[in-house]
Amino acid sequence: MHRFFIAGVGALTLSCAGGTDGGTQNGSPATDDGAAAAEAPADLATSLIARVAERDVAVVLSITNAGGEAVRLDFNSGQRFDVSVSDVEGEEVWRWSEGRSFIQALGSETLAPGATLSYETSWPEPAAGNYRVAGWVTASNRDIRQEVDVRVPLDGEGPQGP
């Protein structure tokens, strides 16, 4: 049973290198790297959805190539994304990648025009309160980040309060 739902949607216009291979892939996990300009401009639309369920907060980070040319994302490890949760004071209370290990190998993902990459995880058993959820792709050549606020209600409390 879902008790509360908050979603954030944004669009980023980035300079991206063109590629020729494509496809939609689901990835696995990481941290924020900087952006780098390249040859062909492309539009990447991002969305971050945080949904409070019975005992967790489900998080989905999606990136869609809304441009006309392929976009290549380069990675310095096997990690493809990361998610962190901060409380109202800005203190991080949970991070998806904490305690995980990732293969130390270069890799890439290419998004064809119209293709979407989606990364999913969940924050287990959060305490009631207000939080800021941040999700980002760990590409070394792009800065792709989205944030959204989420409220975890007290047990028995509906989305609008007791």
Image (tube, rainbow, N blue to C red):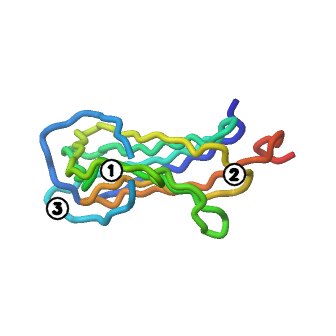
Q: Is residue 114 left or right of residue 55?
A: left
Q: Earlier in the sequence, mark 1 or mark 2?
A: 1
Report the mark closest to the observer, 1 or 2. 2
Amino acid bearing label 3:
Ala
Residue visible at 74% across and 51% down in the picture:
128
| Crowd class of label 2 (few under 14; some 14 to 19; many from 20; radius 10 Å) | many
Count of numbered circles on the image: 3
Q: Are marks 1 and 2 in contact (CB under 8 Å)?
A: no
| Residue 111 at x, y percent in the picture | 25, 42
Residue at numbered disc 2: 151
Residue at numbered disc 3: 38
Q: Measured along the vertical axis of the image, is residue 37 above or below residue 83?
A: below
What numbered label is drawn on residue 44? 1
**In the rendered image, which quarter is residue 133 located in?**
bottom right
Give SS at disc 1. Answer: strand
Which quadrant is the C terminus positioned in? top right
